Amino acid sequence: LHCESNGNEENVIKAHRVILSASSSYFEAMFGNDFNENKNKIVKFHSISYNILKALVSFIYTGKIEINQVNVQELLAAADMLQLNEVVEGCSMYLCRELHASNALGILRFAEAHSCKELADSANSFINSHFPEVAEQELDVFSDLIWEGVLTNAQYLEHFSKNYIFLFHCQETLIQSM
């Protein structure tokens, strides 16, 4: 099996269909059914970069993967797509350890986009317990969330009522941006 990533024939990853199928229900469905990928020698992955796909195939064979600040988001997204739950969990744990006032809302949105409930819960908890710092760091994001109507949840409204000066500033920013 040759996994071709991003249409570059030089970026070929050799792997065994049976091993990929045994490790992931995504590959099991791809190779166990009457899809074109099951018949073709080359499987193209256009939405996964070569380095990420190579790391994930290596993980399937070795059980080891390097998760770092540079690759964590792309790795989690690809692992989520390929249904490699151990990698998704590892990336989620990494992001939980990296939660900070400057990235908590971004991590929350990312977690929700990839249905990572524990990561979303951790980000929510972090936001709740560090609300003033998060609000100060990510004022523009909060303004966007208010504008989009996302911040109607009671837990955030409670924080806003405690931090009415911040709420006034957000409203003022919204009015100015209209």
Image (spheres, grey):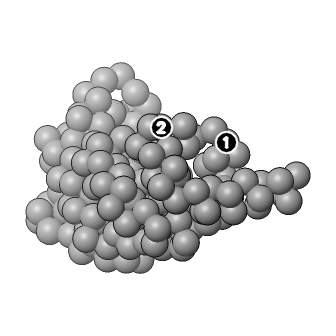
Mark 2 closeness class: few <14, some 14–19, many ≥20 residues within 10 Å: few
Q: Which residue is drawn at 25% across and 71% down?
A: 97
In the displayed structure, does residue 13 sit left or right of residue 65?
right
- Residue 96 picture quarter: bottom left
Between residues 168 and 144, which one lies in front from this camera angle? Answer: 168
Between residues 128 and 89, which one lies in front from this camera angle? Answer: 128
Between residues 33 and 158, which one lies in front from this camera angle? Answer: 158
Mark 1 closeness class: few <14, some 14–19, many ≥20 residues within 10 Å: few
User: Helix or strand or loop: what does disc 1 sit on?
Assistant: helix
Q: Residue at x 52, y 52 (%)?
A: 160
Residue 89 location, x and y as percent?
Answer: 21, 54
In the displayed structure, does residue 9 sit left or right of residue 83?
right
Residue 129, visible in the rendered structure? yes
Residue 44 location, x and y as percent?
Answer: 47, 49
Which residue bears the numbered disc 2? 153
Q: What residue type is labelled 1?
A: Glu
* Front label number (1 vs 2): 2
Labelled pair 1, 2 in contact (Cβ < 8 Å) = no
Residue 109, visible in the rendered structure? no
Residue 55 location, x and y as percent?
Answer: 29, 67
Q: Which residue is drawn at 31% across and 24% down?
A: 33
Q: Residue at x 31, y 66 (%)?
A: 95
- Residue 138 picture quarter: bottom right
Depicted 173 relative to depicted 161: above or below: below
Which residue bears the numbered disc 1? 148
Depicted 79 relative to depicted 54: above or below: above
